Image: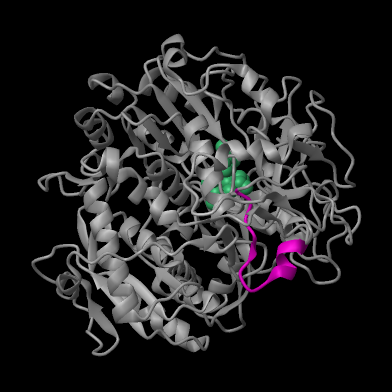
Amino acid sequence: MPDPEGAAPNSGVDVSEAQIAVHWKEEEHLPPPAKFVSQANVADGSIRSRFTLDRFPDCFREYAELLSWERRWHTTLDTERAPFYRWFVGGRLNASFNCLDRHLPHHAAKPAFLWVPEPEAEPVLAVTYRELYERVNEFAALLRDRAGVRAGDRVTVHLPMVPELPVTMLACARLGAIHSVVFGGFSGEACGVRIADSGSRVLVTIDGYYRGGKLLDHKANADLAVAAAAREGQRVDHVLVWRRRPEERSTSAPWVEGRDLDVVTELPRFRGAEVPPVPMESEAPLFLMYTSGTTGRPKGCQHGTGGYLAYAVGTSRIYQDLHPEDVYWCLADIGWITGHTYIVYGPLALATTSVLYEGLPTFPDPARIWRIAERLGVTILHTSPTTIRLLRKADPEGPRRFDLRFKHLTTVGEPIEPDVWRWYFEVVGGGRAAVVDTWWQTETGGVLCSTIPGVDPMKPGSAGPGALGVHPVILDDHGAEVPPGTGRAGNLCIRNPWPGIFQTIWGDPERFVATYFRRFNRDPTSRDWQDWPYFAGDGATESSDGYFRILGRVDDVINVAGHRLGTKEIESACLTVREVAEAAVVPVHDELRGRRPEIYISLKPGASDPGQVASAVARAVEEQIGKIARPSAVRVVADMPKTRSGKIMRRVLGAISNSLDVGDITTLANPEAVAAIQALVRPAGSSPPRPSRTDGDAADPGDR
Ligand code: PRX
């Protein structure tokens, strides 16, 4: 049960993840393993003295100096248009140059990626830095000459976990074009909405890919995406289609002459092409990454070049502890921010070797991950609590049967239960690996709260203190600071900007200020960053040791398996089913995925079979967003609980779905509706409730 004080309330939100957070007891500290410390990039806690608030912002030069600049910056941070910050102003650089060209003298023959196809019979493909450089140059030439891509253009990329994804991103970056990667598991419809919002004329996709033992036809999504974009007024001129199997096309979707371009047949013309990396101003946008917010429309988080890249490389070195000889494996999908920062930009800028895996972590069996890690000698593993829970459930002793050599383990994306953390530490890491629980967001570009693995004690279930140079604070709803150690939850905010912070929401600067900064701003005309605390949208507590524990979202966002979904997006999808009169979506606690959306609908008069409508609603959600949004249950109710002004009380529905106290319902217009819904969700005698699932599957952290 949530502590009533612990619930981090927010304007207009009547059920939130933070309100259904389970309160864990304060855990013990564990020292970082000695062997890890002896080799860590940072093993001396005095590094913090270089990043204190009085050294801000110049402390971050240390990160920028890890990059190669075509022209050095003259101003570390310009706050003239706060909260639209400009980092390393006057500097010029190219992201692809930093990830590729500069490594050729020393690391040309070293693998940048070890690509593991899902079918186990297919060999692992090592892509060296030289090969990656060549492939990026060729594809950049193709983008430029066949699709007319120029600096500043947006290119939407809808690709799964294949080497062609980082090749495409770096080719865009080489030209100064802005990539907008859409998670491969998102539907064509969802991709189309993002194409339209970003104004992309070019879509890069692939014919098919393997997932869960099936060769999925991905090109079909591109056709849906182009149609959806067209409905929103955006024309796509070029669809560039990579091939999963070079020898033949893996799609039965029609080929649209003049629009679709078969990359594999076109590329030979560009063999050996060299495309000079375009030097970009530090604040030129590098990419857009769409994420869900409190309205139906996804937000295109715009990340700049210099600040983002400096933060990616600095935090990769310190928190991932990457060394050139490591074999690093981040299981996230590159289609999410974790993959952008901690598979592509950070590790490549440090000339790391990364494993890239195409498929499902549990295919063909739950030991697949351990087989790959053993065979490739993975030293650093980076994944989400959902995947850890899934692997633990599937085979709790599995990792012990392999010769695993992890020295460092990362968890990211959702709160991790202390006993899940312990399994990760003891069974996966054999008690020898340092574990970091990294809290951050699409908007933040890189880690904001984490222990420094070679310095700080670990605490199961807590992300740790603010990252170097990042100064978090918990504010109550009135903007007053909640002192550490009180156990009281509040809104997690950051006092100061940092180089990885996103620059704006693409095309909607007003929403950028309103969503992230207005809430606790002291003076809207102020140009002083101290007046603009960043509002993260998460509830958290701070312990007396300065460690932050994240409770979950305080807004209309649901974090499913570490991926954000907007309740409004899901509700709009429900309302496309003709028979549905009203829809309300609430987060419900899920043993494997952390949270899942649960849907309540009421039907229009005369609607036929409720079971059929419920199935149609589940289907509509999958088609319009993707399988990741698949609800845990769709419940058809006669009457939604409402306020006297007619607003649906999601708080009450959320409480029922999570077996929590519904609280005071006397002010509702129809309090009797509550008992009827309770009876539906929790039939008499059932305790605790087992919601009727719309699917019986195990969690797939990257649902397709
Ligand atoms: O609620 C927090 C949760 O994930 C949200 C950000 O999601 P997204 O933008 O998709 O980025 C995920 C990967 C960086 C946050 O607002 N979250 C992220 N990391 C953690 C977390 N919750 C608890 N602990 C974490 N380590």
Give, as a single range, the part of the protein colored magenta: 500-514
Give coordinates of residue 423: x percent, y percent: 43, 22
Give coordinates of residue 267: x percent, y percent: 19, 71
Give coordinates of residue 449: x percent, y percent: 62, 35
Between residue 84 and residue 422, name the one nearer to us: 84
In this rendering, the answer to whether 593 lies above or below 622 is above
Between residue 76 and residue 131, name the one nearer to us: 76
Based on the picture, tell me whether residue 509 belongs to the magenta stretch. yes
Is residue 625 rendered to the left or right of residue 651? Answer: left
Residue 697 visible in image: no
Quadrant of the rendering where the C terminus is positioned: bottom left
Quadrant for residue 104, please give it. top left
Q: Residue at x 46, y 39 (%)?
A: 384
Q: Residue at x 19, y 64 (%)?
A: 272
Q: Residue at x 86, y 54 (%)?
A: 521
In this rendering, the answer to whether 208 lies above or below 680 is below
Based on the picture, tell me whether residue 521 belongs to the magenta stretch. no
Between residue 396 and residue 458, name the one nearer to us: 458
